[in-house]
Image (tube, grey):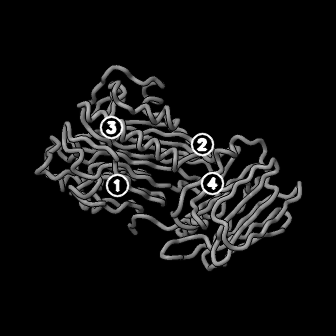
């Protein structure tokens, strides 16, 4: 089954109740040179539709867990015709309507969003011809293991206006990460059109502002950002040279993430006669993941509406947090949730409607389980009901139960101490943050 964005209910069927184990996943980014042949040949021999079908078959053959493509404009259907990834984004259109950004995944993802650049430049080309920009998605790598993925295609060229636009593009992504991925593991990969050897390029913003590490710099360049230009052949004969296509990442408080491999995949993406399929070398990276040692999270329930919130950043600053009081609010739906910790810290999300129920916990009593039920309101999935259960079996509940429910249980020896999700005047989407008892 092919679809753009799965709903959260589907994830319950994908993963059982066992705790997430350590694991790994790999990613690929590739500019697929999908501008119409009449506009841009990309110095690639052969028919673009045929080449695109070959790319799709290669995507299937090597079965990368997450693929980001750029310039996926007028030959999008040809790529998807021969690819078999179960989760794929729908095209936003060919030139001049679409962004050319799409993703193909073996992993379930949600909260997908396309964002157009605020600034573009035609100084060196036609970067303003299409609504280029970046995309965001939250990927469920394993039960309770989530990583935020970003795909981007920044302004090209080296004229002063190009440099200004590209710096604005990358800063726009960095600001979005700060607003929507606070506390989360993040992987940014795509066509940045940037080089470390060009001092005017702003690629370092991801390191300085977001704490991201470039997997190529880390693994191939021994942690040193280059200052001298090193252009790549296509297909590249070495991983040491620098391309404008990048893979950057960081771990999160609830999931440890580490790059273990980076490389050019150029020789895997060739035409039958040995010619290249794109004017860009595709690149790949492998990551290992482990659940957090001081904080973990449950799966999400509800819909991707409202504003993102996370108690994780504050929780990382606390020593041995413990819930002292739980307050839930609801009437027809779940209006609000709140937890007060033993040190007086209070986390409150949602609105003030409905009836509030508060449960005060004893010193040796912990919040260990929560049931959430979701439903539809005005065409949007929201949380309708919550039931909180402590280690002694006491409960607090609010809202109206539905037939679409999920139980989140803290790992043995852990407890619920906070939340993450999206809200407005109600609780649209919710996950629970665990800490050791």
Could you tell me how far apart the alpha carbons at marks 2 and 3 are, in whole angstroms? 30 Å
Classed neighbour count for the residue bearing mark 4: other residues with Cα under 10 Å, few (<14), some (14–19), many (≥20): some
Could you tell me how far apart the alpha carbons at marks 3 and 1 are, in whole angstroms? 20 Å
Does residue 65 appear left or right of residue 387 in this picture?
A: left
Q: Which residue is mark 2?
A: 256
**Among all residues in the image, which is located at the extreme top?**
228
**Which one is earlier in the sequence, the residue at label 1 or at label 2?**
1
The answer to whether mark 1 and mark 4 are in CB contact below 8 A is: no
Q: Is residue 273 visible?
A: yes
Q: Which residue is mark 1?
A: 102
Give the structural element (helix, strand or loop) at label 3.
helix
Classed neighbour count for the residue bearing mark 1: other residues with Cα under 10 Å, few (<14), some (14–19), many (≥20): many
Q: Which residue is mark 3?
A: 166
Q: Which residue is mark 4?
A: 20
Q: Is residue 160 above or below residue 182?
A: above
- Would you identify the image quadrant in which residue 13 lies? bottom right
Q: Residue at x 52, y 44 (%)?
A: 178
Q: Residue at x 54, y 58 (%)?
A: 307
């Amino acid at each position: 089954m092919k679809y753009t964005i799965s709903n959260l209910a589907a994830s319950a069927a994908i993963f059982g109740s066992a705790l997430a184990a350590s694991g790994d996943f790999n990613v690929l980014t590739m500019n697929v040179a999908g501008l119409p042949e009449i506009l841009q040949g990309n110095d690639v021999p052969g028919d673009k539709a045929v080449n695109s079908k070959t790319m799709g078959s290669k995507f299937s053959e090597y079965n990368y867990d997450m693929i980001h493509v750029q310039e996926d404009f007028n030959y999008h259907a040809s790529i998807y015709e021969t690819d078999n990834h179960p989760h794929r984004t729908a095209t936003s259109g060919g030139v001049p309507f679409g962004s050319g950004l799409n993703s193909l995944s073996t992993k379930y993802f949600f909260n997908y969003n396309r964002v157009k650049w605020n600034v573009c430049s035609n100084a060196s080309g036609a970067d303003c011809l299409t609504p280029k920009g970046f995309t965001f998605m939250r990927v469920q790598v394993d039960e309770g293991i989530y990583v935020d993925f970003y795909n981007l295609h920044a302004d090209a060229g080296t004229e002063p206006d190009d440099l200004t636009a590209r710096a604005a593009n990358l800063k726009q992504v960095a600001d979005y990460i700060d607003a929507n991925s606070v506390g989360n593991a993040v992987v940014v990969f795509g066509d940045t059109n940037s080089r470390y050897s060009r001092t005017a390029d702003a690629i370092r913003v991801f390191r300085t502002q977001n704490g991201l590490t470039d997997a190529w710099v880390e693994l191939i360049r021994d942690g040193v950002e280059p200052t001298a230009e090193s252009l790549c052949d296509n297909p590249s004969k070495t991983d040491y040279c620098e391309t404008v296509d990048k893979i950057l990442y960081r771990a999160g408080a609830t999931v440890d993430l580490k790059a273990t491999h980076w490389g050019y995949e150029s020789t895997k993406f060739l035409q039958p006669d040995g010619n290249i399929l794109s004017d860009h070398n595709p690149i790949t990276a492998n990551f290992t993941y482990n659940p957090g040692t001081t904080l973990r999270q449950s799966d999400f329930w509800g819909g991707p509406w409202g504003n993102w919130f996370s108690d994780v950043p504050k929780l990382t600053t606390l020593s041995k947090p413990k819930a002292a009081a739980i307050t839930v609010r609801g009437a027809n739906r779940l209006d609000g949730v709140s937890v007060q910790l033993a040190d007086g810290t209070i986390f409150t999300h949602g609105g003030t409607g409905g009836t509030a129920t508060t449960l005060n916990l004893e010193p040796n009593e912990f919040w260990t389980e929560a049931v959430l039920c979701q439903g539809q309101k005005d065409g949007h999935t929201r949380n309708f009901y919550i039931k909180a259960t402590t280690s002694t079996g006491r409960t607090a509940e609010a809202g109206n139960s539905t037939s679409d429910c999920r139980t989140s249980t803290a790992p043995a020896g852990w407890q619920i101490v906070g939340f993450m999700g999206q809200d407005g005047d109600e609780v649209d989407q919710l996950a629970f943050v665990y800490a050791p008892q």
